[in-house]
Image (cartoon, rainbow, N blue to C red):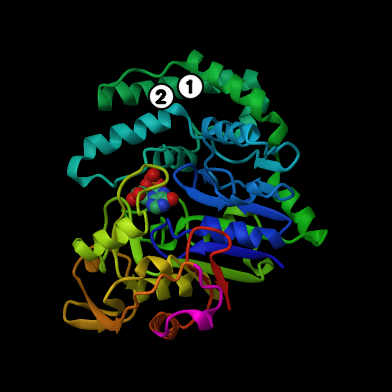
């Protein structure tokens, strides 16, 4: 059985925990998109692991982990994560494979990300400054892109770096009045990357197809969320990759029809980091309650997340474009203690009611939400193991979401630990 886990909102849905649980029944876990802008926290016993690039499956000692073509790989972050896990007794030798065709995020990409955001002032996107946009721009532009396979031919790479440094220096000095880029420094960096990464590099597409032919079960792990998808999200306030389920086939080189089940992960409410429209946002005491109780601060940047009610219009859109079979709804425990809860079931835009999400920014920022209001529950639900033992109002809340979104909520998270999960 091959399965794909994808975020249904604006990222940070808690995919890491769900992937970690499903990884128990998978031979291989695959990261197919995004880069070190992602942040997954996995809690095992009382140990918390914050990962940015490595698939969440790495925590399980027998799971093979793969980073495929469409992931933009920051070698520095990758090496830091491999070494940090090694120090905690978790070795990745022989079970981590990184695509030779993945593009590399270099130091100048991160610098360019920061310079571009600073120059945009109040119009900035609010990126994670992990160099994702500039690296993806170079990938699409092709001429100055560097890929992981370049680490396997250092002589050729030295020449490439010369050309890249000249080009980037022209931009940095002329556009941003910043320092030029030093080719020798870049080369030394790349040599150290090659030293540490060569043993992990392979053609991951061939690897995955061989594993599928051998009957291995594969779990594809999405990064960010559907609403941040470059083509189908709230452009321009999106990331630079196809972070919806649609990115999985292109990112991994495996057709979607080889995936038996697409699982969408959503929080029981909605969050967003960075700028952009957010119809159900509660910039008030409700939002603050959710932020405090749900520890809604970014894993990658530490920024406070914007919080709001569950947007069933947006979630339905994500379910539709992703071909989602079932939903994992997490952080239900965060909503305990609220007198009443609201769920956005339709939008009113320019006097017209619609249940279809239109990601184009301008329309979305004119949206008025039409809510269904239901009673909340006061009980602490963080130790509940069976659906039937949830307070009746919590059960009603789940049923309401299912009825609007039209898919079963098969997994419910009531806390950060593996054990705090209800399966239905
Ligand atoms: P970038 O991917 O760093 O270019 O950031 C673009 C937008 O996507 C910003 O609004 C970020 O906050 C958002 N973003 C990127 N990665 C994540 C993530 O893993 N979770 C939530 N938001 C993200």
Q: Are marks 2 and 1 in contact (CB under 8 Å)?
A: yes
Question: At 49% from the left edge and 34% from the top edge, which residue is drawn?
Answer: 105
Residue 282 visible in the picture: no
Residue 160 visible in the picture: yes
Q: 394 or 173: nearer the eye?
A: 394
Q: Is residue 291 above or below residue 120?
A: below
In the rendered image, the quadrant that contains the N terminus is bottom right
Q: Which residue is mark 2?
A: 167
Q: Position of residue 92 (x, y in %)?
A: 69, 39
From the viewer's perspective, tell me whether residue 195 is left or right of residue 216: left
Magenta region, residue range: 383-392
Mark 2 burial class by Cα count in 10 Å: few <14, some 14-19, many 20+: some
Q: Which residue is mark 1?
A: 163
Q: Is residue 404 above or below residue 211?
A: below
Q: 130 or 84: nearer the eye?
A: 84
Question: At 44% from the left edge and 27% from the top edge, which residue is drawn?
Answer: 107
Q: Secondary structure at mark 1?
A: helix
Q: Assign the magenta stretch its main secondary structure.
A: loop
Inspect the magenta stretch and tell me whether residue 206 lies in it: no
Mark 1 burial class by Cα count in 10 Å: few <14, some 14-19, many 20+: some
Q: Position of residue 187 (x, y in %)?
A: 54, 18
Question: At 42% from the left edge and 69% from the top edge, which residue is drawn?
Answer: 332
From the viewer's perspective, tell me whether residue 147 is left or right of residue 313: right
In the rendered image, the quadrant that contains the C terminus is bottom right
Count of marks, rendered view: 2
Inspect the magenta stretch and tell me whether residue 389 lies in it: yes
Q: Position of residue 222 (x, y in %)?
A: 53, 57
From the viewer's perspective, tell me whether residue 339 is left or right of residue 199: left
């Amino acid at each position: 059985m091959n399965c794909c886990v994808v975020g249904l909102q604006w990222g940070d849905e808690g995919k890491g925990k769900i992937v970690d649980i499903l990884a128990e029944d998978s031979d291989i876990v695959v990261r197919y998109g995004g880069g070190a802008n992602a942040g997954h926290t996995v809690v095992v016993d009382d140990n918390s692991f914050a990962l940015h690039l490595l698939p969440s499956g790495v925590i399980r000692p027998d799971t093979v982990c793969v980073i495929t073509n469409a992931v933009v790989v920051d070698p520095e972050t990758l090496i830091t994560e491999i070494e940090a896990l090694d120090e905690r007794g978790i070795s990745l030798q022989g079970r981590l494979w990184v695509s030779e065709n993945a593009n590399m995020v270099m130091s100048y990409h991160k610098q360019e990300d920061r310079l571009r955001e600073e120059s945009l002032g109040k119009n900035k996107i609010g990126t994670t400054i992990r160099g994702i946009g500039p690296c993806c721009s170079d990938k699409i532009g092709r001429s100055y892109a560097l890929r992981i396979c370049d680490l396997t031919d250092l002589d050729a790479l030295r020449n490439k770096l010369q050309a890249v440094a000249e080009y980037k220096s022209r931009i940095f000095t002329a556009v941003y009045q910043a320092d030029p880029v030093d080719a020798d420094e870049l080369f030394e960096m790349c040599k150290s990357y090659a030293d540490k990464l060569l043993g992990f590099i392979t053609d991951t597409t061939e690897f995955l197809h061989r594993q599928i032919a051998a009957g291995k079960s594969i779990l594809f792990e999405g990064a960010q969320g559907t609403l941040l998808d470059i083509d189908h999200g709230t452009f321009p306030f999106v990331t630079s990759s196809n972070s919806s389920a649609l990115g999985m086939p292109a990112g991994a080189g495996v057709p979607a029809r080889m995936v038996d089940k697409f699982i969408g992960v959503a929080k029981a409410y909605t969050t967003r980091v960075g700028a952009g429209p957010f119809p159900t946002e509660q910039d008030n005491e409700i939002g603050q309650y959710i932020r405090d109780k749900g520890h809604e601060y970014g894993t990658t940047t530490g920024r406070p997340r914007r919080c709001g009610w569950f947007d069933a219009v947006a979630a339905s859109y994500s379910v539709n474009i992703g071909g989602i079979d079932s939903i994992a709804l997490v952080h239900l425990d965060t909503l305990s203690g609220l007198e009443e809860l609201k769920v956005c079931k339709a939008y009113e835009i320019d006097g017209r009611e619609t249940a279809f999400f239109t990601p184009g920014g301008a329309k979305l920022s004119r949206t008025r939400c039409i809510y269904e209001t239901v009673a909340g529950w006061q009980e602490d639900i963080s130790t509940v193991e069976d659906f039937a033992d949830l307070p009746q109002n919590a059960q009603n809340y789940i049923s309401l979401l299912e009825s609007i979104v039209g898919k079963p909520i098969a997994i419910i998270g009531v806390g950060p630990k593996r054990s705090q999960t209800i399966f239905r």
